[in-house]
């Protein structure tokens, strides 16, 4: 019998130690993808999900964390709407593809240049279904892309030469009650419909992340009394969800020509980055993996203007930025662990000989 887990998650992503990945400037020339051998590189990235991928869709007038200092202190040097001190997963995957980070949908003004690298529809706190946040769930985010197609903001060619990233970090669990099997099944059914819809719009490769180890988030580790270790009960639920996800995605690929759906194993990447075995962190580049850099009420000040949070001396030494989101350095470690899966986002040219497809 699994215990009910009640917590909510806003999600973010990272930058580097000694940065070997290049981030193209918005108006700069397109760089070559990180893996030169790939046959066909996506020219655009369309992003759907939550705060682990959101790069600025929260309203600028909103006084929530990603719009307040010290968020954004590492990159770009001020709050940018990212739930992090710097870059997030979206930024890393775009750079891997050799393109600029896609424009947040809420900032698009209808100009052509701003949409050249795709569009980011991810919105912090949202999920497959409606959550506690008054923001667009995944179906609505996909509707936004459909509207852009209907407005001729993007052509069919734009989509067929692109890739999609779908992130889900657990915000749907804020509505979890009752039977865990039925709850996960309901999420999976709708998620699979969403993935198929994205692909059927013309996007050849759709990457979806597994859920990160929720029991290793500082919020959960502290609230369950397990810090400095992870909470096994919560991680068990996460692994169950991820197992179901992998089974459903495998089935989708069996039913769809070209196996267009790609799993990015965020759970394994987090565990690898923090060197966690049996819920106990081992030696890694992060001295205290489950201790966030920004602790307390990160971003909040009291009535006298005094900070209600503390900051670590060096965010590069912290895997987590706040109680729920990795730091830029943490996201770089996650990206590094995911990198071996990223060539699957590339797709062969139509005239590619079959014998050459084994490298993908």
Image (tube, rainbow, N blue to C red):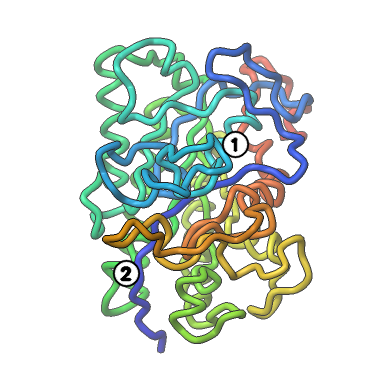
Q: Earlier in the sequence, mark 2 or mark 1?
A: 1
Q: Which residue is located at x 43 percent, y 33 percent?
A: 199
Q: Is residue 3 above or below residue 312?
A: below
Q: Which residue is mark 2?
A: 183
Q: Residue at x 68, y 18 (%)?
A: 31
How far is disc 2 from disc 1 in space, using C-alphas? Answer: 30 Å
Q: Which residue sits at x=53%, y=43%?
A: 73
Q: Pinpoint residue 139: horizontal percent, then vertical percent.
A: 28, 43
Quadrant of the rendering where the C terminus is positioned? top right
Q: Which residue, given by chain and number where applicable, does mark 1 sit on?
A: 93
Query: Looking at the image, which residue sits at the far left?
Result: 134
Q: 95 left or right of 122?
A: right
Residue mark closest to the camera, 2 vs 1: 1
Q: Is residue 338 above or below residue 3?
A: above
Location of residue 359 in the rendering, given as x and y in whole percent from the top left corner: 77, 34
Task: Please state which of residues 149 and 356 is positioned toward the viewer in this rendering.
Answer: 149
């Amino acid at each position: 019998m699994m215990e009910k887990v009640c917590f909510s998650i806003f999600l973010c992503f990272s930058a580097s130690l000694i940065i070997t990945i290049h981030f193209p400037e918005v108006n700069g020339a397109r760089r070559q993808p990180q893996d030169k051998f790939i046959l066909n590189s996506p020219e655009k990235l369309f992003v759907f999900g939550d705060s682990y991928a959101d790069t600025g869709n929260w309203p600028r007038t909103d006084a929530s964390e990603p719009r307040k200092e010290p968020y954004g202190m590492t990159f770009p040097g001020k709050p940018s709407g990212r739930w992090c001190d710097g870059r997030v997963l979206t930024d890393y995957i775009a750079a891997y593809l050799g393109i600029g980070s896609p424009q947040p949908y809420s900032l698009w003004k209808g100009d052509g240049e701003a949409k050249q690298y795709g569009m980011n529809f991810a919105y912090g706190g949202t999920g497959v279904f409606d959550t506690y946040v008054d923001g667009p769930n995944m179906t609505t985010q996909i509707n936004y892309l459909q509207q852009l197609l209907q407005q001729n903001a993007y052509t069919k060619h734009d989509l067929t030469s692109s890739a999609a990233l779908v992130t889900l970090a657990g915000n749907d669990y804020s509505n979890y009650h009752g039977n865990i099997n039925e709850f996960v099944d309901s999420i999976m059914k709708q998620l699979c419909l969403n993935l198929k819809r994205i692909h059927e719009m013309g996007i050849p490769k759709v990457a979806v992340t597994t859920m990160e180890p929720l029991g290793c988030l500082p919020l959960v580790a502290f609230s369950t009394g397990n810090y400095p270790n992870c909470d096994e009960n919560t991680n068990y639920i996460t692994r169950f969800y991820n197992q179901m996800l992998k089974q459903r995605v495998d089935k989708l690929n069996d039913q769809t020509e070209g196996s267009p759906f790609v799993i990015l194993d965020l759970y394994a990447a987090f565990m690898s980055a923090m060197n966690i075995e049996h819920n106990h962190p081992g030696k890694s580049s992060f001295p205290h993996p489950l201790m966030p850099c920004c602790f307390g009420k990160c971003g909040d000040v009291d009535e006298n203007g005094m900070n209600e949070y503390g900051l670590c001396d060096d965010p590069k030494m912290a895997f987590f930025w706040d109680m729920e989101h990795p730091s830029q350095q943490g996201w770089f470690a996650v990206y590094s662990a995911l990198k071996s899966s990223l060539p699957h986002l590339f797709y062969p040219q139509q005239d590619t000989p079959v014998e050459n497809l084994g490298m993908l």
